[in-house]
Amino acid sequence: MNRGLEMQNTAELFDEHSTVQEALDNFAVLIDDVDFADMLSLMGIGKFQFLLRKQMRVELKGLYMALWHLALARSFPDRADEMFNIFLERYLSAHGGKIGIQTVERAKQYRAMLLPSGDGNFIDVARHLASFLIKDQQDTRALTLKLALNIRNAYRFIFDRLI
């Protein structure tokens, strides 16, 4: 009887491990293939705004990583932080250099920014992104709302492809 329980626990651990590994692998592919063209266009960042495009790609990749952490927290509440940290270490190993370091740093910052409201409200993050573009507070409301909706859609996209 003990042997049967041991085998069941081992099978559950193996299944959980393979599910965790699949989530890590899926997101690694997703983040490397994501195209931010629609988001950049929404933000009014043109093709010839090279420096701003480069900066926003780092911001958006970091944000997507933080959104992935939110999705993990729903599906793997006990393992989300561990999985997020493993992913960041692997990402940094595969994408070394200044941009990789900046992206991982932004991911941690966006994760902290998202923690208070979770997946219930993306306005603060959208406001932060809008601050890169518009300096006049009166002009930010429409862009902030559009960005918040786009961020919610990105979150759903990530969540749906978690495993």
Image (cartoon, rainbow, N blue to C red):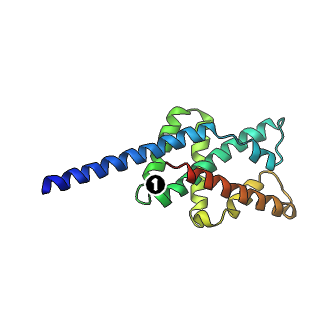
Return the x and y of residue 83 as percentages of the image width and height. 45, 49
Vertical order, 97 against 80 (above or below): above
Taking the spot 68% from the left edge, 59% from the top edge, the residue there is 125
For label 1, the SS is: helix
- Above or below for 124 versus 44: below
Tell me the quadrant of the picture where the N terminus can be found. bottom left
Query: Do we see residue 108 in this rendering?
Result: no
Tell me which amino acid carries mark 1: Asp
The picture places residue 41, in percent across and down from the top left corner, at 80, 45
- Of 147 and 101, nearer the camera is 147
Residue drawn at 36 percent across, 50 percent down: 16
Write down the quadrant of residue 48 in the picture: top right
Number of numbered discs visible in the structure rendering: 1
Q: Is residue 132 visible?
A: yes
Judge from the rendering whether residue 132 lies leftward or rightward of residue 105; answer left or right: right
Q: Is 151 situated left or right of 89 in this image?
A: right
Question: Can you give x and y, in whole percent of width and height, for residue 151 in the image?
Answer: 68, 55
Q: Name, please, the residue furthest toward the left.
A: 1
Could you tell whether 136 is left or right of 81 in the image?
right
Left/right placement of residue 102 relative to residue 84 reads right
Specify few, some or many for label 1: CA neighbours under 10 Å numbering under 14, 14-19, or 20 or more. Answer: some
Residue 2, x across and y down, in percent: 13, 56
Residue at x-position 75% and y-position 41%: 37
Q: Nearer the viewer, residue 58 or 24?
A: 24
- Residue under pointer 1: 81
Which residue corresponds to the image point at 42% horizontal and 43% vertical from the top-left? 21
